[in-house]
Image (cartoon, rainbow, N blue to C red):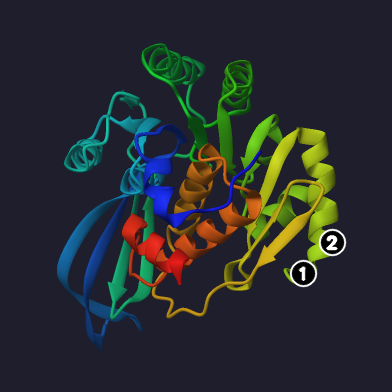
Amino acid sequence: MTNSLNTKTLRQDFANKNILIIGDVMIDAYLWGNVERISPEAPIPIVSVNKRENRMGGAANVALNIAELGANPYLISVIGDDEKGKIFLDLLKKRNISEYGIIIDKHRKTTVKSRVISKNQHLLRVDDEISNPISEDLSNALFQKILDLNSSMKIDAIIFEDYDKGVISSGLISKITEFTTENNIITSVDPKKRNFDDYKNISLFKPNFKEFCEGLACEIDKTEHELIFSNAKEFMSNKNINYMFITLSEEGVFITDGQTWHHIPAERRDIADVSGAGDTAISVATLCLVANLNMYELAKAANLAGGLVCEKPGVVPINLDELIKALEI
């Protein structure tokens, strides 16, 4: 039996739940500045930098969202044995997020996405990364981290946060989902193209619309809700997925349990930056599943949360007080 959303108990519903996040972590680096002239060397703007900042990105941003919502995040991932890796671990420490599940590999580099921003406008992004799949030994070590954590606490949910950077593989997915099925643990997935078809026995599957269409090889419009439903229903049946939750950007969100569906329009907002909205949506949706909320309330809360973080520049987590206030309007 699922419950309706009660903002008065939401904080208690989310509090101290143990959520594991496995996937690709990275640093979101920002250079903030002003454009005052065009370069004489090429027709490009010259940015006078006045601020530099490093933030937790990828699966680490999901962990940060989970923490801000009052639950306990545990990251399972790989970073490089480099200076950026040290910066990443320092970011975890400052946010009081456990580094137990982080493995350092001397053969990889820590992923960094650097963005140049002026007056809240993105001018350039530079990605410094290795996206080849991690070794089988590393993959086994990550799975062992999950088993070790399970022996010391109750795991309420596991989130697969897949950015196609090599941490998640079909073999690791299979091991984890077999483990979660045996132990009745909620699973949610934020998929990417490489492993899209490998997820089975999942509680909640959350692609964006582009990923949904590419993954199912279908050509439909965001507004064709019945076609979205029919395509999702078949995929869910084949993969044993309980809920399909699709983010539709300016069209809001769509959710189905394979029997019925709901479309929730997007709220009107002043969009500053869409980066990280999907991370926030999967975080809120997962905790709503743990709290046993019905799928409409889950989608409503996740849709609101994703919209709220889009009003702020850069990748930022949702604030629980802000979310509760928005839900009460």
Q: Find residue 253 and report its image quarter.
A: bottom right
In the picture of the structure, the residue carrying the numbered disc 1 is 221
Say if mark 1 contacts mark 2, CB within 8 Å.
Answer: yes
User: Which of pointers 1 and 2 lies earlier in the amino acid sequence?
Assistant: 1
Q: Where is residue 239 in the image (x, y as percent from the top left)?
A: 76, 34
Q: Is residue 144 visible?
A: yes
State the quadrant of the N terminus: top right
Residue at horizontal 54%, vertical 62%? Answer: 303
Q: Position of residue 247 (x, y in %)?
A: 61, 60
Q: Find residue 170 and report its image quarter.
A: top right
Q: Is mark 1 on a helix, strand or loop?
A: loop
Q: Where is residue 44 in the image (x, y as percent from the top left)?
A: 34, 80
In the picture of the structure, the residue carrying the numbered disc 2 is 227
Q: What element carries label 2?
A: helix
Q: Which amino acid does label 2 sit on?
A: Leu
Nearer to me, 66 or 117: 66
